[in-house]
Amino acid sequence: MRQKLRDLLDRPLAEQGPALLAGLVALLVLGAIAAIAGALGGDEEAGVVDRPPPPVVGRPAEPQHGGEAELTDAEQTARAFLEEYLPFAYGQGPLPTAGATPELRERLRREYASGGARVPPTKRELAPELTRLDLSGSDPTKLEANAAVDDGGGSPYSFELTVERRRGVWQVTRLGGD
């Protein structure tokens, strides 16, 4: 049997006949199809399908980009909101717009329409500074944040806010115990 195969393979293709040529073409086509199917990722009938990894929320464990930890979109949104909110709460700035939902902005506008600030008049000259921001949560679309603030008045404080992913964008949806 081996000898017959060797004799067959040693002969020029023109002498093999159209059946052998068609068989070789069929093998090449099947090989190409298998290679393409493998490159496209998975076999749905067998239940093996490539999927992207789940989203990661929070700060990366290792510093990136020149030694600085890369901020997540949720954390960037919370920080942008607080950068505007803290001066507003002390009567030193306009209504915060960065990162807040329209509902939260409207609630803050109504709440402070009389020009009131959240801090007593004796503390309005202080300079509030965000000293820490911790985000936590098990839902990849909703995180609770704890913001620590020091205004130089001798009593640092903290408060909660909620950051949610809506229509693909992170937004601050709740402030304090509201």
Image (spheres, rainbow, N blue to C red):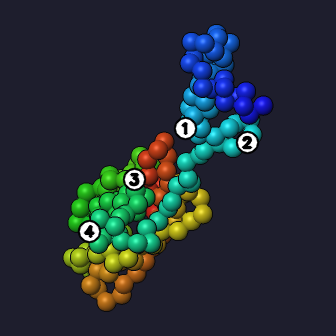
Q: CA distance from mark 3 to mark 1?
A: 43 Å
Residues at marks 2 and 3, CA–CA distance in whole angstroms: 42 Å
Q: CA distance from mark 4 to mark 3?
A: 30 Å
> Residue 21: image x %, image y %?
62, 16
Residue type for callout 1: Ala
In the image, what residue occupies the spot 60% across and 12% down? 15
Give the residue number, with chain letter if any, for mark 3: 100
Q: Please, what is the three-letter code of the amino acid marked with disc 3?
A: Ala
First in sequence, mark 3 or 1: give its number: 1
- Give x and y (percent) for residue 87: 27, 67
Residues marked 4 and 3 touching at CB (< 8 Å): no
Q: Amino acid at mark 2?
A: Gly
Specify few, some or many for label 1: CA neighbours under 10 Å numbering under 14, 14-19, or 20 or more: few
Question: Visible in this render: residue 153?
Answer: yes
Query: Rounded to the nearest whole Å, what is the CA distance between mark 4 and mark 1?
Result: 35 Å
What distance separates the C-alpha of mark 4 from that of mark 2? 42 Å
Q: Which residue is mark 2?
A: 47
Q: Residue furthest top?
A: 18
The residue most toward the bottom is 154
User: Could you tell me how far apart the alpha carbons at marks 2 and 1 are, in whole angstroms?
Assistant: 16 Å
Crowd rating for badge 2 (residues with CA inside 10 Å; few <14, some 14–19, many 20+): few
Secondary structure beneath label 2: loop
Which type of secondary structure does the marked residue at label 1 adopt?
helix
Query: Disc number at residue 66?
Result: 4
The disc at residue 39 is 1
Asked if residue 38 is positioned above or below residue 137 in the image, the reply reads above
Q: For this view, does 53 lie left or right of residue 125? A: right
